[in-house]
Amino acid sequence: MTIIERPKVDVSRVRECGRDSGVVQLSVVFHKSGKVTEVEIVTSSGCEFFDRAALKAAKAIKFKPARQDGNNITVTKRVEYRFTTF
């Protein structure tokens, strides 16, 4: 699988969390059709605004599907987003 475009996370409301930084880890299903079909939070950043923004960004990832034996396959990968407000 090759990521073509990984959208940036909108951090405009993260300051409302009262934190300077955070990390959210997601489990993302990259479907053989070339679409992200499922995204779940594995580890929250502790900031609801950032977690939601990371989910939205991950759903918009553009990629070329993984291949096995000449066929596209569905894979699940961990994706991490970090934020800093300074």
Image (cartoon, rainbow, N blue to C red):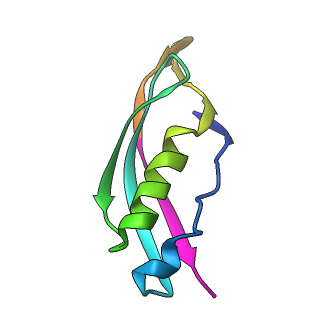
Residue 79 visible in the current orientation = no
* Number of numbered discs visible in the structure rendering: 0
Magenta stretch secondary structure, dominant? strand
Residue 77 visible in the current orientation = yes
Find residue 74 and report its image quarter.
top left
Q: Is residue 78 magenta?
A: yes
| Magenta extent | 77-86
Identified at 57% across, 11% down, the residue is 70
Identified at 32% across, 66% down, the residue is 44
x%, y% of residue 43?
A: 30, 64
Residue farthest right in this picture: 4
x%, y% of residue 2?
A: 63, 36
Q: Vertically, is 47 above or below 59?
A: below
User: Which corner quadrant holds the C terminus?
Assistant: bottom right
State the residue in front, 38 or 71. 38
Identified at 49% across, 47% down, the residue is 56
Find residue 9 and report its image quarter.
bottom right
